[in-house]
Image (tube, rainbow, N blue to C red):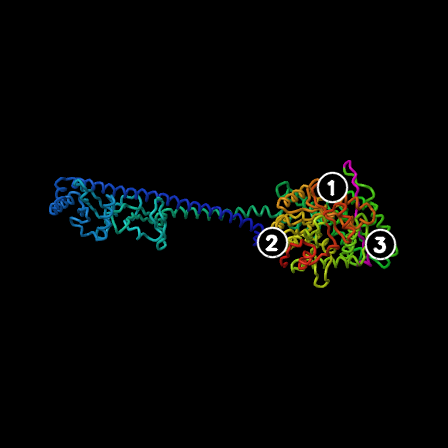
Amino acid sequence: MNFRVGSLRVRIAVIYALLFAAAFGAVIMVASGGIEAYAARVISRDMAANADVFEEILELRASEMRAQADVLSGDFGFRKAVALGDNLTIESALDSLKARAGVPEAFVVEASGAIIGDARALSAKERRGLFQALSNGESAGIVTVSDNPASAVAAPIQLPDLAGWLVLAEPLTKSALTSLSELSAIPLESRIVAANKLPQNITVSSDTSPIERSEDGERILYRASALPSLSGSMKPVLLLRHSLSEALSEYRPLIWLLALLGVIGVCATIVLGWLIARGITRPIAKLDAAAQRVADGHHAFVNVRSRDEVGRLATSFNTMIQAIHDRERKISHIALHDILTDLPNRKLFTEQLNSALARMTNGKRVAVCYLDLDNFKLINDTSGHPAGDAVLKEIARRLTSFMPGAVVSRQGGDEFAVMIADIEADEDMLGHAEQLFHCFDEPVTIGRQQVPINASIGISCSPDDGMEAETLIKNADLALYRAKQEGKAGYQFFEQAMDDAARRRRQLELDLRIALSEGQFELYFQPLYSLSEERLVGFESLLRWHHPQRGMVSPAEFIPLAEETGLIIPIGEWVIREACRQAAQWPERLRVAVNVSSIQFKSTNLQNAILQALAQSGLEPSLLEVEITESVFIADIDQTLDLLHKLRSLGVRISLDDFGTGYSSLSYLRSFPFDKIKIDRSFVTDLDQGTGASAIIRAITTLAGALGMETLAEGVEAEDQIESLRREGCQQAQGFWYSRPVPGGEVGRIVSRLGDPGARMQSVA
């Protein structure tokens, strides 16, 4: 017999035995628990029944005593003796009653609390308690006589008014309670105790279930039920006690018999499990050997000789081995290829690029071309993602066919990469770039619609632009970024200046975040002058950045970066808060204008930011002017108009900046009633050039006047421009002619020079 510890055969036999032992053990536990629960229920029922019997016997005896007491208390001679205070007659009647009723205690409690008769066994406290209970209308209950509980009844003595009570008491001695316990079907100990002297954790409850308690390792059941009281010294409780351990001992032979059967069953199961395991493990050993060969890299199969479960297992094993080989090939392909286009993915492209660079010899070059489809998101948004997927598949097909000797890869999204290896050192890369660009000459057909597709391309070449795959890819991506900046639909070759520019851009972004956290920003203000009223009407707030090393950084340099990185949102919120704070200290009629970026305008927090700024500063909403450009309407016109109306409902004024430079300005004027239109500085500059600028300004002011909107001309730098603007009906002007932008501390000087003579400037923080 092959008995090897840890073998499958032994484990099967042991598992069978353990399962049987666990199952039979559970049966024994359930049976034992059931027996115990059944016994507890029977005992609980018997204890409840006996408690009821005890209480009925006590009540029956109390009824007999009350009947005897009622006879005497109703006797005319007895009542007369009580009325006359004839104690001798009363005591004689009480002795006769005790003999007749068979009780040792009988006495009269007068309405004054005095006791007639032999009541020396009652303590003073017990007498007071008895009198209090009788006064409260109690007529039966337990009293304490000679430190023992006694059943007592009381009959009122009417003359006809209540003159007192006739009380009979019969002690409930231990022998009397033992006699009552003998009536029980189960061995019980019964006694009457005070509620405050109950065993620990035993409480009086209306629940009939007994309470289990452990005493010297023995399980004891207690049942406590309250009894009526005529006592002032105790609250009587009938306490029944029964040993659960003794009751359960009768069932132990049955449990031992079940345990013996379980041991016999386990032994039989071990033998049976060993026989079954031996029949299973022999063919499995062959499968194990085949699996070991597969683990060593061999293509192993198991000879199938039977049609039973083991034979089918061997067949399934052979099928599984073949499926594993097929799946490994497929997984390897998926891991290294794009699922949509089946082109190499970024990982495989990088590996192939590294391999090409390692093989590259002197006089040869390797080029990496990075492509990004222009406005591809618009195709997904308008035609749906299935159409976008069709476009990507078609572009992948074209790139593969147009560049047959190159490695084409999809990098993700709408980005592709092309690697061209073994390029001669003196070969012009322009030819390859043009060939690649021709892939996009023809539009892509989606259904019945032809969609023109363009791409921006960035190109880097080794060894000049790097000798590592990551470096070449990074530099090609930088060239692609430049191609996007140059207007898309073109290609750019990498230059070292691009890398330098990218580094400067990353550093500038880092500095911008530091500037926001360290408070390096400052607001400058340029006056807004009314041509019609000849007075100062407000200021436009302009953001300035004092870099600790570079000095003043131009907004044209950092604002686009802030918009691109999303930092424009917290920066813009700071501008709104700071502009409102400073404007709140200006003369009341002066407004402050704040430019809001289209990126910030899309933020869901813009309305809350404006509300908080107004609340914190105390500035009147009508003195805040939000300036927007037409670019805010490009994404979602309905959402933009909804936000504009919400701001207007707050009392905030809305201005349209750079009017005249957009392609659909008139439709925006019709959609929303702006408070002010700012005429772009390019028209003001061309006023003296005879290019029709005057006619355009006149048309704008006429249109604005008809729509109830103010007009303001930007970039005013000469007096003749002011006269021309007045002549054309422009209401306000802004520019260097009045003042360059100044820090907040110099606003007071501008107000003194241009403002209303009656205006007085408050301190500006």
Q: What residue type is disc 1 on?
A: Leu
Residue located beneath label 2 in the image: 617
Residue 186 inside the magenta-drawn segment: no
Q: Secondary structure at mark 2?
A: helix
Residue located beneath label 3 in the image: 422
Q: Secondary structure at mark 3?
A: strand
Label 1 Cα neighbours within 10 Å, binned few <14 / some 14-19 / many ≥20: some
Closer mark to the observer between disc 1 and disc 3: 1
Locate residue 45, reporting x and y percent: 34, 42
Q: Given the current orientation, which residue lies at the most extreme bottom position?
A: 549
Q: CA distance from mark 1 to mark 2?
A: 36 Å
Say which label, 1 or 3, has the lower sequence index.
3
Q: Secondary structure at mark 1?
A: helix
Q: Which residue is more in the foreground, 631 or 622?
A: 622
Q: CA distance from mark 1 to mark 3?
A: 65 Å
Label 2 Cα neighbours within 10 Å, binned few <14 / some 14-19 / many ≥20: some
Residue 460 inside the magenta-drawn segment: yes
Q: Which residue is more in the foreground, 242 or 749?
A: 749
Q: Which residue is more in the foreground, 631 or 161?
A: 631
Q: Which residues are magenta?
A: 447-466
Q: What residue type is disc 3 on?
A: Asp
For residue 662, which quarter of the picture?
top right
Residue at x-position 77% and y-position 38%: 446
Q: Is residue 329 shown to the viewer in this render?
A: no
For residue 708, which quarter of the picture?
top right
Residue located beneath label 1 in the image: 703
Q: Which residue is more in the foreground, 362 or 118?
A: 118
Q: CA distance from mark 3 to mark 2?
A: 68 Å
Q: Given the current orientation, which residue lies at the most extreme top position?
A: 448
Closer mark to the observer between disc 1 and disc 2: 1
